[in-house]
């Protein structure tokens, strides 16, 4: 099994939107497309990924902001490199708070219940729940550091991921880094107020229950997507369009539902991994995509 990823799915967490930065991404839509090869044969499958994320911050006091939102993701591909294509769908609620603890410390605490499956016949195996705790220390208007952890129940077991991050913006506002490792990293350099180029790295691990099969199966998705992008902002960067191209290492392993690993910390299975994989591995492939971001000021 590939182990390219460095952590678990947080596609979609406030760690990259609600922090020391002076903006919030209220709505983000992404579409990515690639063609994966089968490492054991000449078979291939086209994979399309559609992603939508919405956040609504609601200040309740001078120190507390209630966070609400949802995430939708749909990946369509042939799991066995055949013409039979599956829809792997994840829908999630994101609910929690961001709290100012004083002395330049703040914390973000989120509960993340979700449904993840092919959505053919929903049941208890489709429900999973996760949580995030992220503390941030702001040292100046230019940079801050973040520390925390994330956990999630999955079809293959429970994942636990320690997090460490950095937010930095240069004095001339042309260069910034926004990273929560091992989940997400964004680096950008702006040539003008509207146009800039950068690099983006997203890792994830998550699972989907399969109901459109005779046997009771699940898919374990492991991914690193690295991309270079060009971005253009409209209306003072309220609306941003990014075109991107890069490498997609995503692998989709199929397993029996009762074939699990227990606790997994980062990429390490505490009790070992003796599962039997039921399909071939996916080879790394180039991908192309587009992001549409609606951004507001904090």
Image (cartoon, grey):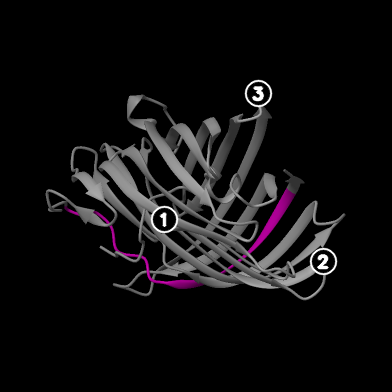
Where is residue 13 drawn, in percent x and y?
52, 44
The extreme front residue here reads: 103
Would you name the residue on which mark 1 appears? 164
Location of the N terminus by quadrant is bottom left
Range drawn in magenta:
276-294
Q: 209 and 206: which one is in front?
A: 206
Dividing the picture into quarters, in which one does residue 267 lie?
Answer: bottom left
Give whichever of discs 1 and 3 has the lower sequence position: 3
- Classify 10 Å Cα crowding around label 3: few (below 14), some (14-19), many (20 and above): few
Disc sitting over residue 194 in the figure = 2
Location of the C terminus by quadrant is top right
Dividing the picture into quarters, in which one does residue 160 lie?
Answer: top left
- Kindly report which numbered mark, 1 or 2, lies closer to the viewer in this rendering: 1
Q: Residue at x 79, y 70 (%)?
A: 195
Q: 122 and 198: which one is in front?
A: 198
Would you name the residue on which mark 3 appears? 60
Q: Is residue 209 depicted above or below 49 in this figure?
A: above
Where is residue 274 drawn, in percent x and y?
12, 53
Q: Residue at x 67, y 69 (%)?
A: 170
* Label 1, label 3: how far apart the Cα atoms are: 28 Å
Q: Residue at x 29, y 65 (%)?
A: 2
Label 1 element class? strand
């Amino acid at each position: 099994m590939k182990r390219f990823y460095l952590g678990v799915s947080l596609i979609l967490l406030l760690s990259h939107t609600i922090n020391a930065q002076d903006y919030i991404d209220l709505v983000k839509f992404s579409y990515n497309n690639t063609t994966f090869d089968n490492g054991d044969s000449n078979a291939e499958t086209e994979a399309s990924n559609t992603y939508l994320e919405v956040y609504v911050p609601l200040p309740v006091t001078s120190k507390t902001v209630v966070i609400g939102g949802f995430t939708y993701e749909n990946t369509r591909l042939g799991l066995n490199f055949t013409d039979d294509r599956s829809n792997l769908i994840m829908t999630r609620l994101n609910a929690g708070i961001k709290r100012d603890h004083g002395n330049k410390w703040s914390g973000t605490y989120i509960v993340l219940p979700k449904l993840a499956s092919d959505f053919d016949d929903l049941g208890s195996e489709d429900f999973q729940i996760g949580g995030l705790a992220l503390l941030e220390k702001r040292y100046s208007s230019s940079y801050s550091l973040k520390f925390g952890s994330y956990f999630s129940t999955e079809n293959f077991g429970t994942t636990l991921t320690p997090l460490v991050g950095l937010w930095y913006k240069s004095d001339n506002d042309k260069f910034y880094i926004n990273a929560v490792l091992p989940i997400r990293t964004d680096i950008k350099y702006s040539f003008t107020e509207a146009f800039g180029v950068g690099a983006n790295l997203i890792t994830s691990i998550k699972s989907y229950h399969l109901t459109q099969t005779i046997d009771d199966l699940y898919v374990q998705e492991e991914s690193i997507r690295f991309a270079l992008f060009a971005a253009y902002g409209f209306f003072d960067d309220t609306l941003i369009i990014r075109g991107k191209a890069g490498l997609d290492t995503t692998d989709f392993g199929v397993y029996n539902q009762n074939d699990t690993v227990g606790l997994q910390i980062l990429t390490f299975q505490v009790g070992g991994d003796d599962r039997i994989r039921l399909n071939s591995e996916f080879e790394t492939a180039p991908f192309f995509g587009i992001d549409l971001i609606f951004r507001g000021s904090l």
